[in-house]
Amino acid sequence: MSSISFEEKRSFPRFPIKIPLVCLDENSNKDLEAAEVFDISAQGIGIITNEELSLGVRLNITLKMPDNGEQVSRKGKVIWIRKIQPVKYRTGVKLEEPKIKPIPLVLRIINFQRKY
């Protein structure tokens, strides 16, 4: 039996969560269709899209909080991409300042989901 060593390189913990979002590609000034958040941390957001983005693409991201409709906007840059299905891509976005406080966002989503 072989032992595979895995070293976590992330500075901040990621929280799996689904939050609706609007995502604008700054290069093409085009909204990404069918984009959704799959996880979030203080410095990054993982999204799933139906289109492949290029490394380094700058994005304007607006999270839409389902509990009160608040919109949380941030800018970020694509730092990794993985194809997960024929037309689905997981994409890692590194956020610019100011950082997101993911724990309050995650707790708000959990509390909202418990009500419904």
Image (cartoon, helix red, strand yellow):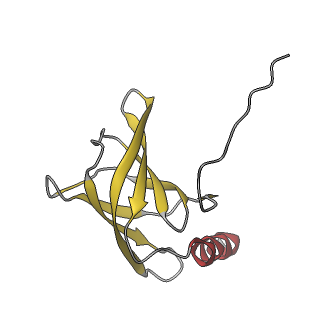
Task: Tell me: residue 114, above or below residue 91.
Answer: below
Q: Quadrant of the N terminus?
A: top right
Query: What residue is drawn where x is 36% and y is 32%?
Result: 87
Which residue is nearer to you in this view: 18 or 29? 29
**Most distant residue in the left direction:** 28
Q: Is residue 20 left or right of residue 25?
A: right
| Rendered image quadrant of residue 55 | top left
Estimate the x, y position of residue 93 in percent, counting from the top left. Answer: 40, 55
Q: Quadrant of the C terminus?
A: bottom right
Position of residue 110 relative to residue 104, above or below, is above
Task: Kindly give the residue lying farthest to the right in the view shown.
Answer: 1
Q: Could you tell me which residue is drawn at 59 percent across and 54 percent down?
A: 10
Q: Residue 82 location in percent, x, y?
A: 44, 35
Residue 86 in the image, given as x and y percentages of width and height: 39, 26
Report the residue that reaches farthest toward the top: 1
| Count of picture labels | 0
Q: Residue at x 74, y 27 (%)?
A: 4
Q: Residue at x 65, y 47 (%)?
A: 8
Which quarter of the figure has residue 5?
top right
Give the side of residue 35 with respect to residue 115, left or right. Answer: left
Q: In the picture, residue 72 is in which quadrant?
A: bottom left
Seen from the viewer's position, the closer of residues 20 and 13 is 13
Horizontal arrangement in the rendering, residue 11 relative to residue 37 (left or right): right
Where is residue 16? Give x, y as percent: 61, 56
